[in-house]
Image (tube, grey):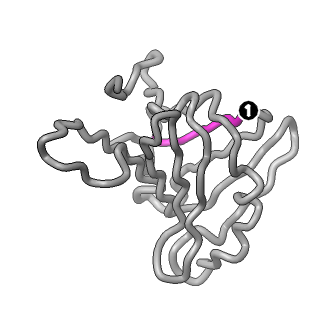
């Protein structure tokens, strides 16, 4: 197994999910929405979203506000994410300003930008804790208002 790592593209970072597929979407009233990505070796990464999600293709955009905690939290409004299941990731950029842009194989873009001044998304690889003897280095990255953490 090759270790996944973050790669720089100028001042931005490329998430190590390029080539992976969206394997599941967690939508629940009990927790924040999450997208689970999986590579060919069944290793999983998880992206948890705490702000609005913008889905775009070409010039059209759809804003999904149901992922924002608080009064607008409504996981049932995030059903369009289900249509992305099984699609491969062709680009996944964490911009220096905290904005996240994931491009899928059908050219749909998923974008998350902080509108609250707080963290808008959390990425972690691997998504599950491994046995300490496996020595898998965890990657954790957060997009906040105006920066990456």
Find residue 107 and report its horizontal and vertical position in percent.
Answer: 78, 33
Magenta-span inclusion, residue 102: yes
Q: Residue furthest left?
A: 133
- From the viewer's perspective, is residue 15 above or below residue 143? above
Residue 28 is situated, as x and y percent measured from the top left of the image, at 55, 77
Q: Is residue 8 above or below residue 22?
A: above
- The residue positioned 36% from the left and 43% from the top of the image is 125
**Residue 115: x, y in percent?**
54, 58
Nearer to me, 147 or 25: 25
Residue at x 12%, y 41% (from the top left corner): 133
Name the residue that disc number 1 marks.
Answer: 105
Estimate the x, y position of residue 72 in percent, counting from the top left.
62, 78
**Tag 1 secondary structure:** loop
Classify mark 1: residues with Cα within 10 Å, few (<14), some (14-19) or many (20+): some
Q: Is residue 45 above or below residue 94?
A: below
Judged by its main secondary structure, the magenta piece is strand
Does 85 appear in magenta?
no
- Give, as a single range, the part of the protein colored magenta: 98-104
Residue displayed at 63% across by 34% down: 89
């Amino acid at each position: 197994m090759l270790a996944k790592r973050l790669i720089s593209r100028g001042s931005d970072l490329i998430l190590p999910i390029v080539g992976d597929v969206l394997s599941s979407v967690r939508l629940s009233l009990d927790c924040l929405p999450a997208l689970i990505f999986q590579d060919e070796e069944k290793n999983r990464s998880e992206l948890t979203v705490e702000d609005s999600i913008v889905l775009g293709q070409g010039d059209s955009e759809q804003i999904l506000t149901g992922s924002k905690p608080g009064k607008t939290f409504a996981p049932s409004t995030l059903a369009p994410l289900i249509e992305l299941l099984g699609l491969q990731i062709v680009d996944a950029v964490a911009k220096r300003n905290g904005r996240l842009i994931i491009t899928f194989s059908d050219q749909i873009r998923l974008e998350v930008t902080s509108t609250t001044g707080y963290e808008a998304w959390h990425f972690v690889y691997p998504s599950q804790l491994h046995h300490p003897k496996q020595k898998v280095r965890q990657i954790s990255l957060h997009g906040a208002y105006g920066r990456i953490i």
